[in-house]
């Protein structure tokens, strides 16, 4: 069966838009390949880039608010049905939200004032719609412990507003655009720290109980230590946005790295090395302390190279790896398939890890940068090959 026929059948049978993870993981997987390939061609001088904004700002925006934003929407709108015991967000509302996300990604590369205007409207409409849907779900269910989720998403919306106000100023808005991108990055990292801090030890504990019952261990749930680490991350993020070159900011970065490293150690990831779907989550989270440490060290040593490596340890390493790992697991669980990694996905996790290491070494030469781009593309291409039939197929019966 061809891809087009599978897609038509999935839409006709109401499968594709039955759960948010299906269209959004498919869209973000494809976008991860296309946007990175386009960026690699641009760096090589083979592809033009819209000139209304500096290329790095447009690229950064689309990776944070586009790629990561789409994955966040797919995960949260799927998870909220479990959190609230309500029917999943599906059908027309989900189709509209996906259309807004897709329109924003296309408009980002349309030239002129019209393209800029469409990009702005589509981006703000997407985040506004996502906030409204999440607020409706947790509000209707009166799920008080999850009220913070739409508040956090509203932070993305306000950051987008600030970004596009700054972008309208042209060169005079460069500082505002950079601050918006840094704030967006730390909003994603904050969500990883909060949500990852709950699901990674929980998934690990469940696997140990069923697969290795001889190991009698109780992993810590989200406690005061975890809260302290999240607060340290928030303080570091605020300082990094307001005073990115100040030495206290560097110290906060090292503190956030230490606390997140200790969190990871408490989850005992070495016990789940038999299951790639689990160790990839631990590995992805491990890039948080690495990135924080590199950012802190780069600030204190006034080394732009170390500082840049820290940003990419967080963006390429932590965000890229965890989106791939969580998407692989969520798609299996919600489609009724065993929670065990396919060999292709184990290879994809390896490619992304190697690509992160090479990206941190990018100053060693142009070939290192190009190879890191190819490894990212390869990892997400493997995801699409393995998971497109799953995302377009109905849930397996028990």
Image (cartoon, grey):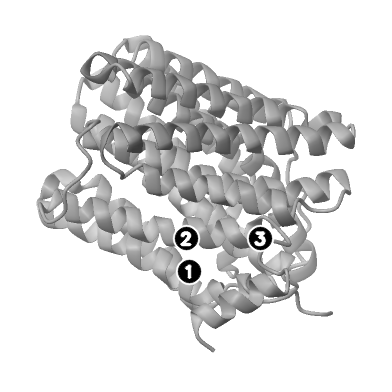
Mark number, residue 372:
none
Q: CA distance from mark 1 to mark 2?
A: 7 Å
How many numbered marks does the figure carry? 3
Callout 1–callout 2 Cβ contact below 8 Å = yes
**Tag 1, which secondary structure?**
helix
Q: Earlier in the sequence, mark 1 or mark 2?
A: 2
Q: Is residue 129 above or below residue 282?
A: above
Residue 370's image quarter?
A: bottom left
Residue 176 lies left or right of residue 229; in this view the side is left
Residue at 68% from the left image edge and 70% from the top image edge: 339
Residue 185's image quarter?
A: top left
Closer to the camera in the image, 33 or 298: 33
Residue at 47% from the left image edge and 60% from the top image edge: 29
Q: Which residue is mark 2?
A: 29
Q: Which residue is mark 3?
A: 330
Q: Earlier in the sequence, mark 3 or mark 2?
A: 2
Locate the N terminus and report the quarter of the image it occupies: bottom right
Closer to the camera in the image, 228 or 112: 112
Q: CA distance from mark 3 to mark 1?
A: 13 Å
Percent position of residue 204, x then y: 69, 56
Residue at 26% from the left image edge and 45% from the top image edge: 360
Residue 315 lies left or right of residue 93; in this view the side is left
Q: CA distance from mark 3 to mark 2?
A: 14 Å
Percent position of residue 207, x then y: 73, 63
């Amino acid at each position: 069966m061809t891809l087009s026929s599978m897609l038509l059948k999935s839409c006709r049978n109401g499968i594709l838009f039955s759960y948010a993870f299906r269209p959004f993981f498919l869209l973000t997987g494809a976008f991860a390949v296309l946007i990175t390939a386009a960026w690699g061609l641009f760096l090589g001088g083979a592809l033009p880039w819209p000139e209304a904004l500096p290329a790095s700002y447009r690229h950064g925006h689309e990776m944070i608010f586009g790629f990561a934003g789409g994955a966040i929407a797919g995960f949260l709108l799927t998870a909220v049905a479990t959190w609230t015991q309500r029917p999943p967000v599906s059908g027309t509302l989900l189709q509209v939200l996906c259309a807004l996300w897709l329109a924003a990604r296309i408009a980002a590369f349309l030239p002129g004032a019209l393209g800029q205007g469409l990009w702005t409207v589509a981006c703000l409409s997407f985040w506004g719609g996502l906030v409204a849907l999440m607020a409706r779900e947790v509000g209707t269910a009166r799920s008080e412990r999850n009220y913070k989720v739409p508040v956090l998403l509203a932070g993305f919306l306000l950051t987008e507003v600030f970004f596009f106000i700054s972008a309208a100023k042209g060169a005079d808005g460069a500082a505002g655009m950079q601050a918006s991108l840094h704030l967006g990055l730390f909003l994603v990292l904050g969500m990883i720290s909060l949500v990852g801090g709950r699901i990674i030890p929980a998934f690990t504990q469940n696997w140990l109980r069923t697969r290795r019952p001889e190991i009698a261990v109780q992993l810590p749930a989200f406690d005061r230590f975890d809260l302290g680490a999240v607060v340290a991350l928030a303080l570091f993020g605020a300082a990094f946005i307001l005073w990115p070159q100040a030495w206290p900011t560097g110290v906060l970065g090292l503190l956030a790295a230490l606390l997140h490293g200790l969190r990871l150690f408490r989850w005992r990831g070495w016990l789940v090395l038999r299951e790639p779907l689990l160790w990839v989550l631990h590995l992805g989270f491990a890039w948080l302390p690495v990135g924080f440490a590199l950012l802190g060290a780069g600030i204190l040593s006034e080394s732009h190279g170390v500082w840049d490596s820290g940003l990419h340890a967080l963006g390429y390493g932590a965000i890229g790896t965890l989106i791939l790992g969580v998407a692989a697991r969520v798609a299996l669980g919600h489609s009724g398939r065993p929670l065990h990694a396919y060999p292709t996905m184990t290879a994809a996790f390896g490619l992304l890890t190697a690509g992160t290491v090479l990206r941190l070494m990018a100053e060693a030469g142009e070939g290192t940068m190009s190879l890191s781009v190819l490894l990212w593309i390869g990892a997400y291409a493997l995801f699409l090959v393995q998971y497109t039939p799953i995302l377009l197929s109905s849930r397996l019966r028990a």
